[in-house]
Amino acid sequence: MEEIIGFIEKNKENYIEELKDFLRIPSISTFPENKDDIVRCAEFVSDNLKRIGLSRVEIFKTEGHPIVYGEWLGAPGKPTVLIYGHYDVQPIDPIELWNSPPFEPTIKNGKIFARGATDDKGQVFMHLKSVEAYFKTEGSLPLNVKFIIEGEEEIGSENLSVFLKNNAELLECDAVLISDTSLYEAGVPTLTYGLRGLAYLEVEIVGPNRDLHSGGFGGIVANPINILTQIISKLKDKNDKVTIPRFYDGILNLTKKEEENLKSFKLSDKKLAKELGVDSLIGEKGFTTLERLWTRPTLDCNGIFGGFIGKGAKTVIPSKASAKISMRLVPNQNPNKIAKMFEKHIKKIAPKTVKVKVTNLHGGYPIVSPIDNPANIAAAKAMQKAFGKKTVFVREGGSIPIVIEFSKKLKAPVVLMGLGLNSENLHSPNEHFDLNHFQLGIKSSAYFLSELAVVK
Ligand code: BES
Ligand code: MN
Ligand code: MN
């Protein structure tokens, strides 16, 4: 092991240079105009998987963006780990708020700034480099490894879901390893054992059959923007509870063990509020900030548009207005059922003076896995070795919809070994990744492969 760790340390700079090439590719999955970049990015991943020493590497075309698969199965009788990640990234807007161009990786104060740095290219790359370190030093791996790196995570993983259904045998494994989550705090080794699910919908309110002069018609016809905002404001009550009937039905309670674990974290609301530039935090009455974030569902408007939004003024009653609304879900909420309940509720509270159209954009199930499965224990040991500190277990507020599907279809435990930080601006301008965590992640990955190799 020392030799492998030594190799990782010696190659720190090389690894960073290679990561920069990965980050230069604008693989934004949601825009059709980036299709070629997506293809180029899949090729980059595939070339790298070949170069680090895997025996079989393939790019699978899908209805959407390609899936990159790689394997090395040279350790018969040993466990197999499936490493998942995504090479696609979020859009870059608002571009004017970036301090350096989003696809020209820039290092400042030990952090690498670029779209995708922490979500998820930097984290995916840690595992490629740990595998490389094994091959370059020992010439082999202590267990079997499969990689599955997709290009549609940020748009719902629809085609990976199909691929998984059709190729469960190819992806067969004893554990899944994912680095696409966050550390509790800088320098604290962290494993995530729960993620929230998601229901994401768009609501369109249609009023008069055309835009109208707001003097000629103001005060006599329902304004879709006014109606839409009234509807949104009714979706949470004064205690910040979601008002959709049956929304909270059947939600799983925390176990005693979880409650104790949760209490061991001391989070300062004040400090976090200050860091976010707000006066104070808010949330569902009767719960702490960490409970709200990790264990409670919520509803948020993610975007709202309609009417005149250009510079200056234009007096108009718009014909239409829309909002994008997401709900974060916890076990046992079902995203499809929640979407239906949402639609029914919106249609019920909207006045007859407008038409309402609701579109379900995408969703995903929440997951909570046992803290003490053998794969998580191996991962906790691995991170402890790399960081020289005890590993903590957290739940997180974000979503990775494919996780539950892996766990169900492959019947394998999923290890969420995230090395990001929530403060690293994922999905936002000036996304970055701490290069110290990048290095610690490569080491954690290397230790994990050797720890998992001896798990029966
Ligand atoms: N890596 C994130 C998920 C994440 C972030 C988990 C931080 C835990 C902590 C992932 O790329 C993501 O952004 N997921 C989306 C869901 C998807 C369906 C668009 C999300 O959570 O909004
Ligand atoms: Mn991600
Ligand atoms: Mn993301």
Image: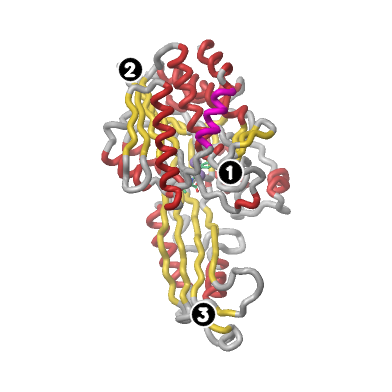
436 vs 284, nearest the viewer: 436
Q: Which residue is mark 1?
A: 102
Q: Looking at the picture, which amino acid does disc 2 mark?
A: Gly
Q: Is mark 1 within 8 Å of ligand 3?
A: no
Q: Position of residue 281 (x, y in %)?
A: 67, 51
Q: Which residue is mark 3?
A: 211
For the residues labelled 2 and 3, the Cα–Cα distance comes to 66 Å
> Residue placed at 54% from the left, 66% from the top?
305
159 vs 372, nearest the viewer: 159
For the residues labelled 1 and 2, the Cα–Cα distance comes to 39 Å
Q: Which residue is mark 2?
A: 74
Going from N to C along the chain, the mark reached first, 1 or 2, is 2
Q: Secondary structure at mark 2?
A: loop
Going from N to C along the chain, the mark reached first, 2 or 3, is 2
Q: Secondary structure at mark 1?
A: loop
**Residue 385 visible in the snapshot:** no
Highlighted magenta segment, given as a residue range: 13-23
Classified by dominant secondary structure, the portion drawn in magenta counts as: helix
Q: Is the residue marked by circle 1 packed among few (<14), some (14-19), or many (20+) residues within 10 Å?
A: many
> Residue placed at 28% from the left, 35% from the top?
168
Q: Position of residue 149 (x, y in %)?
A: 41, 35
Q: Is residue 211 above or below residue 228?
A: below
